[in-house]
Amino acid sequence: MSIFIIGRQGAGKSTVAQMLSAELKCRVAETGQVVTDELARLYARFVSGNREHAGFWSKGLGTLKEDVRDQLETLGELMTRLKSDCLISRCRMEATIIVGVRRRCEVFATPRSSADTWIRVERPSAANRGVFELDDLPCDFVLRNNGSFADLEATVKAMAQAIK
């Protein structure tokens, strides 16, 4: 079973994933981290000339995400065009909860199971931000993140109970 959390940048996907992870006692993997790690490997190889520096670059890119967002989006796009399921496959190896699926080709290239759960997180302030092609994807849950943090926690706890 995998739990996919989708939504636009800034919708609260990572927050929901961490809350759900605590409730269900399972690990989270983010497609964005896979892309960051790949970009770090490229920087380590071609900028510093030493593949062993990938960890250093990954930490640095993590703190500079806003500054390198265009590069990350371009690399994510390239990775999914070359092999549509590459981000999801890597995340599935690491965790149960997968955050950050953004493109149709990723969804349709991924072997689906009836045990999978799809959650879309929506937030009015995140409308039209970043690459996101899945506004019309049918999901098991649609979480509207437009209240307080306590409201979000209560909603995620109820969702976790339904998933169990």
Image: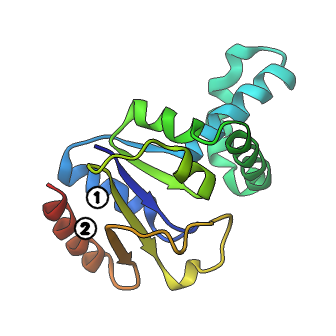
Q: Is residue 77 above or below residue 46?
A: below
The x, y position of residue 57, in whole percent, is: 69, 31
Q: Is residue 137 left or right of residue 26?
A: right
The x, y position of residue 155, in whole percent, is: 24, 74
Residue that badge 1 annotates: 19
- Report the residue at 50% width, 32% height from top: 90
Q: Is residue 17 left or right of residue 158?
A: right
The x, y position of residue 86, in whole percent, is: 59, 36
Q: Amino acid at mark 1?
A: Met
Which mark is nearer the camera, 2 or 1? Answer: 2
The x, y position of residue 25, in whole percent, is: 20, 44
Check whether the beta carbons of the residues at disc 2 and disc 1 lie within 8 A of each other: yes
Q: Judge the density around disc 2: few (<14), some (14-19), many (≥20) Cα neighbours within 10 Å.
A: many
Residue that badge 2 annotates: 156
- Report the residue at 57% width, 40% height from top: 85
- Report the residue at 40% width, 32% height from top: 94
Q: Quadrant location of the N terminus? A: top left
Label disc, if present, on residue 80 of the rendered structure: none
Query: How far apart are the two marked residues, 2 and 1, measured between alpha carbons?
Result: 7 Å
At mark 2, the secondary structure is helix
